Amino acid sequence: MPLTNPPPDAIAGLTLAEIATLAADGKLPPVESWNPTHCGDSSMRILADGTWLHEGSPIGRSAMVRLFSTVLRREPDGGHVLVTPAEKLSIAVDEAPFVGVEMTSEGMGTTRRLAFRTNVGDLVVAGAAHALVVEDRGHGTHPYLRVRGRLDALIARSVYYELANLALDEAPGADGAVGLWSDGVFFALGNADA
C-alpha cells in the first residue's frame, strides 16, 4: 500500500525538486489538504494507456511523469487537477490516471495478498483501502484498482488475464461470484454463470 503522507507542514515550503526527492523516497505530498485557487488548464492529458502528454506531445522523462503524478488529485466532481500549495491546474484524463502494469500474488484463498505496480511506480496491495473493481465507467467494462485518494489505476489487459487465471483456479463463491481475496477482502471479478 502507498506510504503515508508526511505532515502538511513538512513540505508546504518545499521546491518541486525537494518534492521529487520525497516522492522518490515513497513519501507523497498531502494534496488532499491543499486548496489553492484554480489557475487554469495545464495543457496536459493522460491517455488510457498511461501516456502523459503536454500540449499533445508525450512527456518522455519518466522522472517528470512521476513528479507530476505525486501532485495529481481527483476532485469530488470527477475532474482531475495538478495541485501544489500555491496553484491548481486542470488535467484531462481519458480513462484512469494510472495503469496497473504488474501484479504479484502471495498465498491462496482467504490468505492471498495481491500487490500491484503502476506505470508511475506506485506499489499497492489490494484490500479494504485499495479496492479492486470491475465496472463500466462509460468506456466499456474494465478492472480498476484504487491507488490513493480518489485516484485509480486501469488494470492492464495482461495483468487482468493473470487475475482471471488465478480466480478461475479457485472455486467460485456460494453466490457464483468468481474473484479473489486480497488482504482479507473478497473482490468479485465476474460470475461463474456468465
Image (cartoon, rainbow, N blue to C red):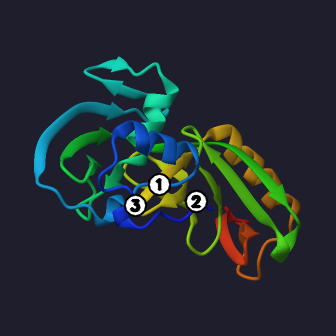
Residue drawn at x 26%, y 61% as measured from the top left = 34
Count how many numbered circles sit on residues in the image. Answer: 3
Q: Give the CA separation, mark 1 to mark 3.
A: 11 Å
Quick check: marks 2 and 3 in contact, CB under 8 Å? no
Dividing the picture into quadrants, the one containing residue 189 is: bottom right
Q: Residue at x 41, y 55 (%)?
A: 29
The three-letter amino acid code for the residue at tag 3 is Ala
Residue 165 position, x and y percent, is 81, 51
Q: Are marks 1 and 2 in contact (CB under 8 Å)?
A: yes
Helix, strand or loop at label 1? It is: loop
Q: Which residue is mark 1?
A: 28
Label 2, label 3: how far apart the Cα atoms are? 18 Å
Under tag 2, what secondary structure?
Answer: loop
Identify the image quadrant of residue 97.
top left
Viewer-proximal residue, 173 or 104? 104
Q: Which residue is mark 3?
A: 10
In the depicted structure, whether residue 57 falls above or below residue 163: above
Answer whether labels 1 and 3 touch (C-beta < 8 Å): no
| Circle 3: element type | helix
Label 1 crowd (10 A; few <14 / some 14-19 / many >=20): many
Q: Residues within 10 Å of mark 2 (few under 14, many from 20)?
A: some
Residue at which label 2 appears: 2
- Viewer-side label of 1, 3: 3
Extreme bottom residue here?
A: 174
